[in-house]
Image (cartoon, rainbow, N blue to C red):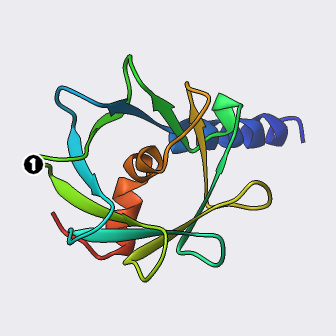
Amino acid sequence: MNKILPLILALLFTNIVISQESVEIKDSGFGDTSIRIKNNGFGDISVRFTNTFADITVGFTDTKYKADFVLKHSGIADRSVKITKNGLADITIVQKDIGQGDVSIQIKDNGIVDYLIHSDRDTITKAEIIAALINIIKEKADYED
């Protein structure tokens, strides 16, 4: 029993450390990925934010170590994503609040969620949620680069 408890604790700690990804959100300059967010028209993927059943559920946490994604606006991160409203980008996302979308996201205040997000700022925009989840969104939409 004395050897099993440290092993279990080590596995739990390793899972927490490995599963967390830090994402730097950039408004200017270059990022590992660039995303153009539009509110209408055509794009590579459409993302609908909904209050009911969704492909992806997200929640927010004030505790950094509990988050699956840690959003940063400066400093070193695992990857960086530049968000733009116009111009060229690696992928164009049409953000919708009504109608059908390729991928749907539900923001939940409580309960079980697929992903927890922490930010170094007080508020998190829908564009920042898309930036954090872009690889998951691409996978759900069967999008290939």
**Does residue 85 sit above or below 56 in this rendering?**
above
- Residue 26: x, y in percent? 31, 30
**Does residue 127 sit above or below 72 in this rendering?**
below
> What residue is shown with label 1?
88
- Residue 37: x, y in percent? 29, 54
> At 66% across and 76% down in the image, what residue appears?
52
In this view of the protein, which residue sits in the foreground, 66 or 14?
Answer: 66
Outermost residue to the bottom:
100
Task: Please name the amino acid that badge 1 sits on.
Answer: Leu
In this view of the protein, which residue sits in the foreground, 10 or 127?
Answer: 127
**Label 1: element kind:** loop
In this view of the protein, which residue sits in the foreground, 64 or 84?
Answer: 84
- Residue 49: x, y in percent? 52, 66
> At 38% across and 16% down in the image, what residue appears?
75
Question: Is 145 left or right of 9, judged from the image as shown?
Answer: left
Outermost residue to the right:
1
Identify the image quadrant of residue 145: bottom left
Q: Indicate the quadrant containing the N terminus: top left, top right, bottom left or bottom right.
A: top right
- Residue 137: x, y in percent? 38, 64
**Is disc 1 surrounded by few (<14), some (14 to 19) or many (20+) residues within 10 Å?**
few
Question: Is 36 left or right of 88, judged from the image as shown?
Answer: right
> At 71% across and 32% down in the image, what residue appears?
62
> At 41% across and 24% down in the image, what residue appears?
73
**Does residue 60 sit above or below 142 in this rendering?**
above
